[in-house]
Amino acid sequence: MTSPTSHTYLKTRAAVMAKRLFSPERLERMLQSPLETLGREFELNGIFEHTVSQAALNRAAEKALIHTLMEELGVLLRPLDGTARDILIHWTRKFELYNLKALIRGKLQNLPFDQIRPYLYELPSFISLPHDRLLRTESILELLRSLEQGPFADIAQQARRVYEEKNEPFSLDAAIDRSYYTGMFRRIRRVETGDHAPLQRLVGTLIDQQNLIWLLRYRFSYQLSPSETYYLLIPFGRRLHRERLMTLVNLDQFEQVIERLPGGLREYLAGVDELLGAERQLEAMTVVQARNCLRFSQSAVTRSLAYLVLREMDLKKLYALVQGKVLNLSDPLIRIAAGMEQHEREEVYDTQGKHV
Amino acid sequence: MFSPQPMKHVLLQVLTGDLPQVSLILAELELFSPDHRPLYEEHFPLVPGERFRDLYTQASSRLHKISRHIPLNPQVHLGGIHVISEQELEQTNLWLGEVWERCSAYEESLRRFADEKQMISQLEQALENFGELNIDLGLLQGERLFLDIHIGMVPRANVTQLKEAVTLADYLLFDYMEHEGNVHVIVVGPKGEHEKELRSVLDTAGFRALPIPPELQHEPERVRADLARRKLELERQLQNENDAIHSCASENRERLEQSRNTLIMAEPFVRIDTAARSAGHLSIISGWIPAREIRRIRQALEETLTNPFRLDTRNPTPDERPLVPSYVPDNRLMTPFATLVRQYGIPRYGEVDPTAIFAVTFILMFGMMFGDMGHGATIALIAWLARRKLRSFTLFAVSIGISATLFGLLYGSIFGYEDLIDAFWIAPLSDPIYMLSVALKWGIAFLLLISLISIYNRIIQGDLGRALFDSNGLISTLLYMSLLYLVYDYYADGGFSLVAAASTLLSLLVLLTYKAIQTKASPGERMLVAFIETFETLTGYISNTLSFLRVAAFSLNHVALAIAVFALADMMVTVQAHILMVICGNLFILVLEGAIVTIQALRLEYYEGFSRFYSGDGLEFRPLRLNTGGKV
């Protein structure tokens, strides 16, 4: 952050932009609106007019929404410099990592480049991989050699092991995500003192959410061993730190894991007995935490990051709405897909002032 | 010379099968710039050549990758230019695919050799380490009854997490050495149910086993010799691979260069892309051609095409003007000046091309600021001697050198000596006020010329409102001239002319009203913005005019610097020191002041000149051409 003026400007910016976040009433209105109205409101009309197939339309809508998020990121980045700027840019790298996963998975399955390309997000040049060059590689080994030359060398090595030893690619996904969060933490360690703790809390919450979902999935859906599950987790969450994770991976039943969670988390997940439910509850928890950061944090960069986290979740909901309408799904189904019930839960937690 | 060439929009109707040939003809002529707008989408819905483009892109990518291993001759000899069919392109692509497969296998081998080499190096380090330990290595080798032991290395970043993970499988991890980003570890645990689980964790963590030879304890020399042998073998295999790729290179280089030619000749059809559209057998190509070249293009098409074609041309519509590429034919004399103008931007179609004005005014201003026969002649001479390095910039440097020489003659200055010859015009320091007044008049003339060009440009663009009322428009110019007249009157007679005062006030009011109408805001804000912008226009003219005082200031500065050099030289005790001082001082003036004067003259051109009339956001005319630069 350059100066107190920039700090104040960024806080004001984040507060103004926070008004764009969806309230339950707005989501309900959007659900009742026809597709054309949504298109007009979110500047997706061009896509609806020119795209023919449903799949292409979905992809185009998704790209347009990501584009919106990137434009807003551009606005938030303007007053920032140094590590604070770097943190917001690094957050958006997750989309580039989605691209990397799509590229590697596509090449592992020997898909031709024109079948992989539609699944890649179009991102600003400062975070974008040289897609065309990587897509033009003619085998997985050539792709890996290209990646080994750049900043993704460690991920390329992991991918090589997956390819050569015919392993399941989830270890690759985990390696990519771990490298992403490690990068985030490395940057947080370098920020100014005032920003350090709030950022660590917010990112720690995101990691807790991720860790718990993986833990439940690896242990009870994929039946991985405790040691392997633990190795695939990120050991620097906010509530789920090393010791706690080691205890949790050793438990043999879903309910036991929920029982042994620390206070706040346990309350959120009380009564949940399946993965999907856990994912929804954890997302609701993250939303509450991010909203608190957006409203009350003293750190402008934390507020900005919280805004981006919430905005991404909102745009995902919007995407689910658009997708549901394109596919002519019923309102109750769209409501589930867009997580609107969960949104109502977030509001309840929020108004009760429940802090995790 | 003063504006880009008139252009015509062309619509070329041909048979779809003739498209590649037409593309090639247009590329050979280098006069056609494709228009990619979907103007005729309704009647010609298809964009032909999709497969052709895919094949081209893949083949180009392959050739580019291959050329990393098999360098091609940078000089391209196209030989017989002919139309590339899809079949020929496909065959070329297939063949390039085969060659790339060999190169790719070579790359992979190199990677594996590097990997193996690193493994041997790690092993050497580990053995050295074990050699110094007083333990029975036999205990770590082979199958144990109760213990499961793994010796190997892990990337440094994974060690902490792995250490914790293996404890969950009742194993222990000990790290004993670190080498080149890898940590050497021993993992030990009880044999039994967790063995498989551990292997899976180790795999995920990138663990690589290090085979400890059983002879290490008793015959370490034999082990070392063995490793050295493995290294040598590796080197030999690497040499074999290198020989294989070299032989592949000499075997295929000629055909690769032919393939490059094929791709160069296929490229024009690819570059036309969406500028060509088709509906069954009939296709169209749309684009821009310099008006005077239409006949040449028609003639070339008539001579080459056997099938009928139709070429329709029209002038650009007013809406299209911003999209029309600006074609300024190359002029060898103007090239260095054009390069400097392009640094600022490309002229819009129809706009005045400032290159000629820039060339004349820059040369004059440089000479006036740096007038010295000796220095000017030195610059011209050095530029001539270094003409091979300076290439097209030789003329630029020679011109400013000659200009400085001529002004030196007018000022009577040679290498700072002001009394060797009589000045043909004036020695700057003899009447500084006169020099400043000349610079001021030069500035006024320059700004008036620029304002007139600005008005012309806006009229050409059909923007009459801005041509009349905006900053640098007709009313602003009137305001400037009235102000000048007012000031002149005041200095000449000590009073103000009524006509000039009325004209100043009237033009100010008109400007204010125009700005107020143009601003979209609340009434208060509108007035404020209008007032500030009008005031800015007024002060802009004053400050820009005063900016030109630097032209005289630098001519004075040049003499002052020379006086300083001679003063220092006079302080020297010996004649030799005096001469040395004069030479060094002159070199100092030549380099330092020469650079400063160049920058200042450029600043006057860009800031006081171009920014007033030259938008610089035009589109460069990039015709379809055969890319013989050797790049693919």
Image: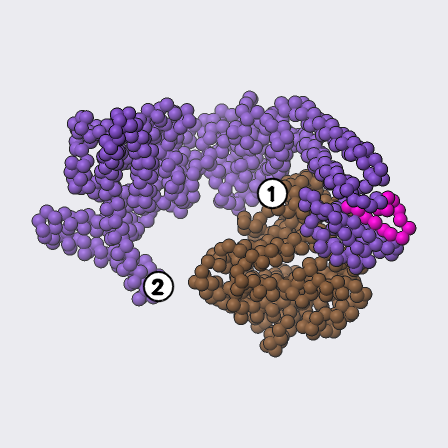
Front residue (pair A117, B631): B631
Residue type beneath disc 2: Ala
Q: Mark on residue B521?
A: 2
Which of the 4 quarters of the picture holds residue B119? top right
Q: Position of residue B25 (x, y in %)?
A: 51, 29
Residue in the image at 24% along x and 53% along y? B538
Q: Which residue is disc 1 drawn over? A: A132
Q: Say which element carries label 1.
A: helix
Q: Is residue B469 above or below residue B377?
A: below
Residue in the image at 57% along x and 41% along y? B47
Q: Please give the range of residues in magenta.
A: B138-152
The chain drawn in purple is B
Report the label total.
Answer: 2
Q: Position of residue A27 (x, y in %)?
A: 58, 69
Quarter holding the N terminus of chain B? top left
Q: Is residue A48 above or below residue A334?
A: above
Which of the 4 quarters of the picture holds residue B551? top left
Chain letter of mark 2 equals B
Residue in the image at 55% along x and 31% along y? B631
Residue type beneath disc 1: Asp
Front residue (pair A102, B303): A102
